[in-house]
Amino acid sequence: MMFTVVNNPNTAPSQALVAPRPVESGNARALLANRQFHVCGVNMRGEAPLIQASAGGAFLVGEEASKYVLQIRRANPGLPLIVEPRALRRHWASATEPFQGEGTEGAFQLDLDAELDRQRMSSDLAITPTGQIRKGDSAALKAALAGANALDREDVLFALPTSAGWLSDELLTRQLIAVINRSRHPVLLAFTDPTNPVGSMSRARAYRRIFMEATVPVVAYRADLVGFDALAHGALASAIGSYPSLRRLTPVGGRGSSIDPEDMSPHMLITDMLRFVRSTHMRREWFPNAASIKCFCVICRGDDLDRLHGSEEERRIGHNHNVVAVDNLFSGYLNLDGAGRRALWARQTAGALDTYPQLESHIGRSVKVDNLLTVWAS
């Protein structure tokens, strides 16, 4: 039991030992299989040592990724490290320019193969530097596919950073699936939105459909817990961020939005509820008159889950909790086949629904069930 107040026995971390595993550098399908990945940003040096190396890995993102990747690799030699190209955050894809290399504007640009070779100097896999694809921009989508399919190598992920609008339109979702299924490389699939790109029930259903109908390996990238729904329905792997801006791609030139931008306390993962909840929300809404949930992970060690405020140090503690909590949740999925993963997810989501009356009994008032949990449990 990892928490007080709420208990979902189906999310308990597995106690099975994980055998040491080499880093299958340069082999995308082998490296991604049977691992849980984390998207690591400003706290990448602090989060990397917490990841279960033989069952996980890290995508390093942001301007500091290339600066620190070699330092992180020396400190964590058994941990797969993949550096996200800037294009996924900074470039709009077009039919004539679906990719953008790392060179400065106006400087000599490497061809795509050479750009990927440059990435591999510090990264265990290369990622196509695909720009963000606007809703309905079929020409850019097809140009990216053609460029990626021209590559004859096994160390590359075909990145598809697409607008969340592709999930809101039945015809566009079908087109996206068709393009994915024509890829000769594993697909790194992420969606762009100022807030949660898979935050509605309709988008969550469309997202699940992609993984159910994909015939090539797909990674649920920059995901939240929807990454586990993807795993249960056919994803090769998922990559989950420790804080909200790492669990989506913000549209080029935009800024993420927050319900309360002045409240910077961390969102804490309560695995038993399959839910991230801001520490401040728990203090104000759940536990003003009742004892808080206590967490017994290696970061919290029995402390109250709502104890953290908005300082950088406390935010780091909260994000470290999330890294450990995601790995604990994934531990039950290790070495399961597709049917086993679906069955485990069904038990976990049913158990998460059961935690709501437990919490309500403790605090003496109703708590709204997350709409996405309703979809996941269906």
Image: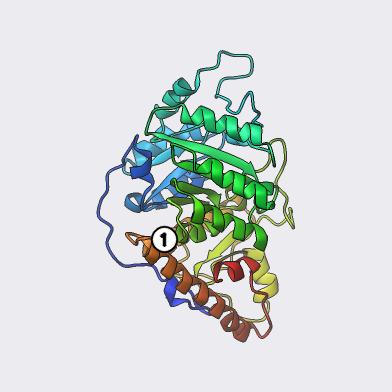
Residue 306 visible within the image: no
Give the residue at mark 1.
330
Secondary structure beneath disc 1? Answer: helix
Query: Is 375 left or right of 67, judged from the image as shown?
Result: right
Going 63% across and 18% down the picture, which residue do you hit?
A: 105
Kindly identify the amino acid type of the residue bearing the numbered disc 1.
Phe
Q: Position of residue 62 (x, y in %)?
A: 56, 37
Please say if 323 is above or below 126. Answer: below
Q: Position of residue 126 (x, y in %)?
A: 44, 33
State the residue in front, 195 or 61: 195
Going 57% across and 27% down the picture, which residue do you hit?
A: 99
State the residue in front, 337 or 5: 337
**In which quadrant of the rendered image does the C terminus lie?**
bottom right
State the residue in front, 168 or 53: 168
Model colouring: rainbow
Task: Assess disc 1: are there few (<14), some (14-19) or many (≥20) residues with their C-alpha within 10 Å of its C-alpha.
Answer: many
Quadrant of the rendered structure where residue 376 is?
Answer: bottom right
Going 44% across and 51% down the picture, which residue do you hit?
A: 237
Q: Position of residue 125 (x, y in %)?
A: 41, 35
**In which quadrant of the rendered image does the N terminus lie?**
bottom left
Quadrant of the rendered structure where residue 279 is?
Answer: bottom right
Please say if 358 is above or below 184. Answer: below
Residue 99 visible within the image: yes
Q: Position of residue 121 (x, y in %)?
A: 39, 26
Give the total of numbered labels: 1
State the residue in front, 226 or 4: 226
